[in-house]
Image: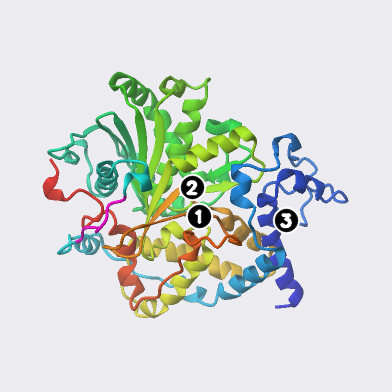
Amino acid sequence: RSESQVDRRSESQVDSFRRLTEPAKKRAKTTDNDSGNWWWPFGRKDVKDPTALLPDESEAPPGGFVSDLLEDLESDEVIEKETMAFMDRVGKVGANMIKDFTEKSEDEEKIEWEVKADGKTGFVPTKEMTGVESAICQLCSTISAQLYTKTSHEQFKLSTKDMKTELFIYDDHGAFLDVTPPFLVAITGKTMILGWGGTWSLADGLNDAAASPLSSLAWRKYAKTIKVQGAMTSIAHNDIVNHGNAIIAKAKELGITEIVTTGQSLGGGLSQIGHLTLRALIEDAKSQWHELEGINVRSVAFCGPMTTVLLNNATPETDVFLEKLWNNSCNVVYKNDVVPRGYGYLSFMEDFVEDAQGDLGKALPIPRIAKRFLDIQGKLDVLIQGAKNHESLAGLLGVFSQYRHMGNLIYYESEDAEPLVLKDMGAFHKNTKGATNLLRSIKYKPVENPMDEFMGWHMDIIRGPGLSIPEEQLM
């Protein structure tokens, strides 16, 4: 590999990163006027697009909520150095990633789901951490767990002797179940909970991996700043539009005061996008959802992936909206779970892959969700290794790096550890203030048998029973 090839691929990721994080005014002044090329929001140096959209400088105030999130970045030199180091790691283990792994059968995984002797999380997050009472947090965890195992309205048990919960809607999508996770609406008191199922089928794995950041008409006023994972957006919007009339009518009938979106894994990502969508629609005077004006919306996700990309061009109105979104969002992260570190915490994911090499060499059956991750990771590794000088591949990693979490991240180092509240300030954050509560300061911790622990990291927080209500208390 020549030095010039390394330089080109690293520069491509730096360019992609800077296009997103620099304020629009600054970017407009540095547009390549000789070529007439504006790369918005992503692109390659060698592609000219005379019809490309120029940023609106009037929509780029000098500072605000979004700018504060994106301003404290490492220098271009540091970003380039870290990019080159990561790219050199990728592919070294790629050949093992595309082996024909055997995945565990459904029965084998059901055995893994048996309740442990204890299995209860030692500390339930407080309202200060999540924004909801502890009982609602546990109900959200219970809903997220039952969405994996219940297949009909009658099978769900969500009430306790102290808290009655009604299942209002359960939609398994019928013939589309294998490509669309189930969705439900439950009601307890004046709280309505919208829940999405997590990753299980092969198609769900593809939805997890489709990482194109897109805008939506649902938040059209903020579309130039807020981009989210495209495949998940389609799924969330499908359920919101199909059940919107019933949800609105029931919320008005019962005097609902808060809507909470929830889910685990893929469902956690869907809940975050559902929150964004509903908050924007309720604030939109032209939307039918505006009938619910005054109802707060928040998300309580479990092990959800990063779903959001922010461009540093926010208007004051967008800053206000995003700050409310941030303050009403939380996501629970457990131990070494890889899923909440995707897409943007690339070094954490690669650390896991390297640590798992010994297990992978044993050719033993592995969890199905792990197989989905390794299939995708392995193909990406080999693709990059085989095309080191292809700028678009470096640019792809640049796009992945832009993904971030919104709001509080409730991190459990172990089952009985008191959770920490972390923030995700994004990739290449310099942290000049020396903050200690950052997600990306929590590094992967090597273990003896990573593949044996993979499912526990990802599932134990909602099962066994984790944060969920114990089965014997449900009715």
Q: Amino acid at mark 3?
A: Arg
Observer-nearest of 428 and 362: 428
Numbered circle sitting on residue 424: 1
Image position of 216 (left or right of 164): right
x, y (%) of residue 189? 24, 30
What is the CA distance from the residue labelled 3 to the residue labelled 1? 27 Å
Magenta part, dominant SS: loop
Q: Classify mark 2: residues with Cα within 10 Å, few (<14), some (14-19) or many (20+).
A: many
Mark 2 residue element:
loop
Q: Of label 1 and label 2, which has the lower sequence position?
A: 2
The answer to the question of whether label 1 and label 2 lie on touching residues, with beta carbons closer than 8 A, is yes
Between the C-alphas of marks 1 and 2, the distance is 7 Å
* Residue 139 placement, left or right of 429: left
Q: Amino acid at mark 1?
A: Asp
Which numbered marker is on residue 406? 2
Scheme by which the image is coloured: rainbow
Q: First in sequence, mark 2 or 3: give its number.
A: 3
Q: Which residue is mark 3?
A: 44
Residue at (21, 58) in percent of width and height: 120
The mark that comes first in sequence, 3 or 1, is 3
